[in-house]
């Protein structure tokens, strides 16, 4: 028999591998489904790639790769004593085979036993060889089988590396030199001191400079000024600004070229007056909670509808998502996305095509994993009602695990790859970004969210205006406390709380501010001050105000209530508000109108380039000293503001009086250079107009990042135009979008000649997207949008419980078949009282679908008057 088995395996010996260091063995879950060794058909592990496949998908892998030898793993779970209550872990009956598998189900019996079974299966004849079978198998096969059986599951091996990284203490932490330069970091208003970016900011722990980090693959990041600063100064350590928590912060060592630990991070941050130890957090039951304030019992109970007997629901569309530990933000976002027909059609409707054309490693393919997760949620296979003999109260909803999808979508992201709680809105935009990047040449479901915002900027001194359009996916609504309808109650609560603190008594019951939704919309449409506005009409900095309107309305509207902020003590806080969000919404009056009769446009000129040496010369005073109304400046200084800040306010508002200057002070008082003396930059003559210099900046010598090009092309812009925009803006994605809108009609000959050095030979100059609803000859005008009426109906909302985005728990409510359903991790139930007034992110779908039309993008020149 041994000779027979040896001869049988000889043709397949070259394809059987022993797992090496770094190989991940997927023996707990199928790459295409949520089948596991506990499933009825078990799991098949390829003995060459170590990928796992359920019975339904193993044949596909065999046909595609020709790999014939698989290890079949099956776990049999049996209940020994029925009817007893408890949550005991099953006992192993068969000790010969060790699979090192996580238990994928919830057990409700007092005592269980399980038996593991493994065997080799040879395709296509399904010849089976039971394991262990040491005497009859060749030595190489025996070693390979033992290695697979005893290897940790893929995610047990991955988590220490990518989730709970084994980060080492930096050798610079103990002896770090910090300059006594008086730098104080404010709790908000940060921006890169080189390019004024406001994301991915890093604080150098030696001199306190705040600079942007590198460009990430997902389109976020910066221009790498933090690294440039290190090369100039050799100051080694920097901390990421938005990761500072009581438990630590993300610290990077430029000299060691890796993330590091800084045991003295609290002292190093306090050098810049950042007190991280005032925040106290702990983790309970997988959810981050706070212990520095009174527990928000009412909020948790109301949002989770804890006091009610909720009826569990099962079947298609009612499948929960397991919480991996602070991963509820992932589950809520995914549940809402797959309740939208565009995502269902793209990933579930095309399931077989996606699976058939998946790469050799489907666990690393975005479309495959989205299709797998969507099918798991919508098929009903993992949300089955209890059997007749089983009590509904005892029946556990299992849900599906997003582990494979989360590992893929968060790879390379410093926040989402961790096990910490994250902001659901940031993750939602990250997923949309990933969908954009992976939809080139195919249907893009995120088109349903995309819309254009018209921004009207007015110079307060010259009264001239500029109209711009930008792409957006989410509207952020302020929550104006001053508009609260229970303001007197709030004032009384504040007085009682202060009295209790003074007398060392227990604080009173908290009072939640109740703000009308109309007040939030009104605050959104109110003019905002533009920081560091440079008026091309005055050729100088001035006061500017900006108003925003909808240039187009999306098919699905996302509204976020801005509930989170930083206090002056650097403690992240959540604004406790209740907003009467309506079921039906009409935003028609917020549609943009474009340039109006009688309005004069600001000249299309570039701001001056600042030269450091000339700045120092100007600070000495010269014939070009600015004219400043000193009387107005002193009037403001008497109010307690720094004199230099008052002089800058008067100058930048064009000497228009103390009131205008006061508004400038309020808008800029949190900036790091607020109180520094006024310095005027030298100006370099750049020519009269942008049109004289099409690029607007010297082109870079190298090609823009392919990831950035893919993001722009996925939004409907031609590849050549996208490359030109990135080269003109030093690869800054946000500025590149603005550049495209300003230069929508470049001559094709100029574009092609400029791209000649960048484009590979034979690359098509056309748009790679195919969308029958968009006219091909108009795609160059801007991104694809699905414009229509501004009337909407609420169909989903995500709620947050807790006092910070770094802690708490998320659940979502979705309206399906005319009834509200609550999705709380793996539990899915009919909602009795959906807490719509306590939501964080709201999702609306457009009404009047018969009149809704997919339109070509409007002309970004937008200056037509109707």
Image: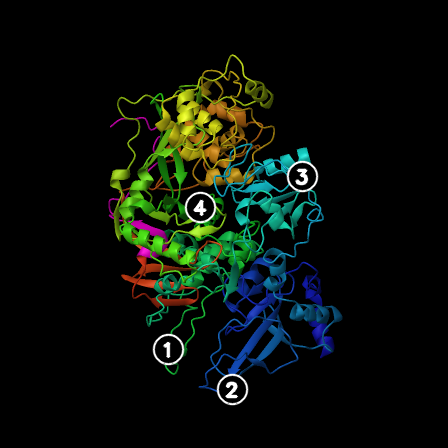
Res 580 visible? no
Foreground tag (4 vs 3): 3
Tell me which numbered mark, 1 or 3, is placed earlier along the sequence.
3
- Residue identifier under label 1: 392
Secondary structure of the residue carrying numbered label 4: loop
Tell me which numbered mark, 2 or 1, is placed earlier along the sequence.
2
| Number of other residues with Cα within 10 Å of mark 4, as a class: few under 14, some 14 to 19, many 20 or more | few
User: Tags 4 and 1 in contact by the CB under 8 Å rule?
Assistant: no
Foreground tag (2 vs 4): 2
Residue 380: x, y in percent? 40, 67
Residue 1: x, y in percent? 71, 79
- Determine whether 456 is above or below 199 in the image: above
Instruction: Report the span colored magenta.
Output: 837-866
- Residue identifier under label 3: 235
Q: Which mark is residue 442?
A: 4
| Number of other residues with Cα within 10 Å of mark 3, as a class: few under 14, some 14 to 19, many 20 or more | many
As drawn, which residue projects farthest toward the top?
623
- Determine whether 613 is above or below 142 in the image: above
| Number of other residues with Cα within 10 Å of mark 2, as a class: few under 14, some 14 to 19, many 20 or more | few
| Snapshot quadrant of residue 858 | top left
Tell me which numbered mark, 4 or 1, is placed earlier along the sequence.
1
Q: Which mark is residue 80?
A: 2
- Could you tell whether 237 is left or right of 551 in the image? right
Residue 145: x, y in percent? 68, 70
Secondary structure of the residue carrying numbered label 1: helix
Foreground tag (1 vs 3): 3
Residue 284: x, y in percent? 50, 66
């Amino acid at each position: 028999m041994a000779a027979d088995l040896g001869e049988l395996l000889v043709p397949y010996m070259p394809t059987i591998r022993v797992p090496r260091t770094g190989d991940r063995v997927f023996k707990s879950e199928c790459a295409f489904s949520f089948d596991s060794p506990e499933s009825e058909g078990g799991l098949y592990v390829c003995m060459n790639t170590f990928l796992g496949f359920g019975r339904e998908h193993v044949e596909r892998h065999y046909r595609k790769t020709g790999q014939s030898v698989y290890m079949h793993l099956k776990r049999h779970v049996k209940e020994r004593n029925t009817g007893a209550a408890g949550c005991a872990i099953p006992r192993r009956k068969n000790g010969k085979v060790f699979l090192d598998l996580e238990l994928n189900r919830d057990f409700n019996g007092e005592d269980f036993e399980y038996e593991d079974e493994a065997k080799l299966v040879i395709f296509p004849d399904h010849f089976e060889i039971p394991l262990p079978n040491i005497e009859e198998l060749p030595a190489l096969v025996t070693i390979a089988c033992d290695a697979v059986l005893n290897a940790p599951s893929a995610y047990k091996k991955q988590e220490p590396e990518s989730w709970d990284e084994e980060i080492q203490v930096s050798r610079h932490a103990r002896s770090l030199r910090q300059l006594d330069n008086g730098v104080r970091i404010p709790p908000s208003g940060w921006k890169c001191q080189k390019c004024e970016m406001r994301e991915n900011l890093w604080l150098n722990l030696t001199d306190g400079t705040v600079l942007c980090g590198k460009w990430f693959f997902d389109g976020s990041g910066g221009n790498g000024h933090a690294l440039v600063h290190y090369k100039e100064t050799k100051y080694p350590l920097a901390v990421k600004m938005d990761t500072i928590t009581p438990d630590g912060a993300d610290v990077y060592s430029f000299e060691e070229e890796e993330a590091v630990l800084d045991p003295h991070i609290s002292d190093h941050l306090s050098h810049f007056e950042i007190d991280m130890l005032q925040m106290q957090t702990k983790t309970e039951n997988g959810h981050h909670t706070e212990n520095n304030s009174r527990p928000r019992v009412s909020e948790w109970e109301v949002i989770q509808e804890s006091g009610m007997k909720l009826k569990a629901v099962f079947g298609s569309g009612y499948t929960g998502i397991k919480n991996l530990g602070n991963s509820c933000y992932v589950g809520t976002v995914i549940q809402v996305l797959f309740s939208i027909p565009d995502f269902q059609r793209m990933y579930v409707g095309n399931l077989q095509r996606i699976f058939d054309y998946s790469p050799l490693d489907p666990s690393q393919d975005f479309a495959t994993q989205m299709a797998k997760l969507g099918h798991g949620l919508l098929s009903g296979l993992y949300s089955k009602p209890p059997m007749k003999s089983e009590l509904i109260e005892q029946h556990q909803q299992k849900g599906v695990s997003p582990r494979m999808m989360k590992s893929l979508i968060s790879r390379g992201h410093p926040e989402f790859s961790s096990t910490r709680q994250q902001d659901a809105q940031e993750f939602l935009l990250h997923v949309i970004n990933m969908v954009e990047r992976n939809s080139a040449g195919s249907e893009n479901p995120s088109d349903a969210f995309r819309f254009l915002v018209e921004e009207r900027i007015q110079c307060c001194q010259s009264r001239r205006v500029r109209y711009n359009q930008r792409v957006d996916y989410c509207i952020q609504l302020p929550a104006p406390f001053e508009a609260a309808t229970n303001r007197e109650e709030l004032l009384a609560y504040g007085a009682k709380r202060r009295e209790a603190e003074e007398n060392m008594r227990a604080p009173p019951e908290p009072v939640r501010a109740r703000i009308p939704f109309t007040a939030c919309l009104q605050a959104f449409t109110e003019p905002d001050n533009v920081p560091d506005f440079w008026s091309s009409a005055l050729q100088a900095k001035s006061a500017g105000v900006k108003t925003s309107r909808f240039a187009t309305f999306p098919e699905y509207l996302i509204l976020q209530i801005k509930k989170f902020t930083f206090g002056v003590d650097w403690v992240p806080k959540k604004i406790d508000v209740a907003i009467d969000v309506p079921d039906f919404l009409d935003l028609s009056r917020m549609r943009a109108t474009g340039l109006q009769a009688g309005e004069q446009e600001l000249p299309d000129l570039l701001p001056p380039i600042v030269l450091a040496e000339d700045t120092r010369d100007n600070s000495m005073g010269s014939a070009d000293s600015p004219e400043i109304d000193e009387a107005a400046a002193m009037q403001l200084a008497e109010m307690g503001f720094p004199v230099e800040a008052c002089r800058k306010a008067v100058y930048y508002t064009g000497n228009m009086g103390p009131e205008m200057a006061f508004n400038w002070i309020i808008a800029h008082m949190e900036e790091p250079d607020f109180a520094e003396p006024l310095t005027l930059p030298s100006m370099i003559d750049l020519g009269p107009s942008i049109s004289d210099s099409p690029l607007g900046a010297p082109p870079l010598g190298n090609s823009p990042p392919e990831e950035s090009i893919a993001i722009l092309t996925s939004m409907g812009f031609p590849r050549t135009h996208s490359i030109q925009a990135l080269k003109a803006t030093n690869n800054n994605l946000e500025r590149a979008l603005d550049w495209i809108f300003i230069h929508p009609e470049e001559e094709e000959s100029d574009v092609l000649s400029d791209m000649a050095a960048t484009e590979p030979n034979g690359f098509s100059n056309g748009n790679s997207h195919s969308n029958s609803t968009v006219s091909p000859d108009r795609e160059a005008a801007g991104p694809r949008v699905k414009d229509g009426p501004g009337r909407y109906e609420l169909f989903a909302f995500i709620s947050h419980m807790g006092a910070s985005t770094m802690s708490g728990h998320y659940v979502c409510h979705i309206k399906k078949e005319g009834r509200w359903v609550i999705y709380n991790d793996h539990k899915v139930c009919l909602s009795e009282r959906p807490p719509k007034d306590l939501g964080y992110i709201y999702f609306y779908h457009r009404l009047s679908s018969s009149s809704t039309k997919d339109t070509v993008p409007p002309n970004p020149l937008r200056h037509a008057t109707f």
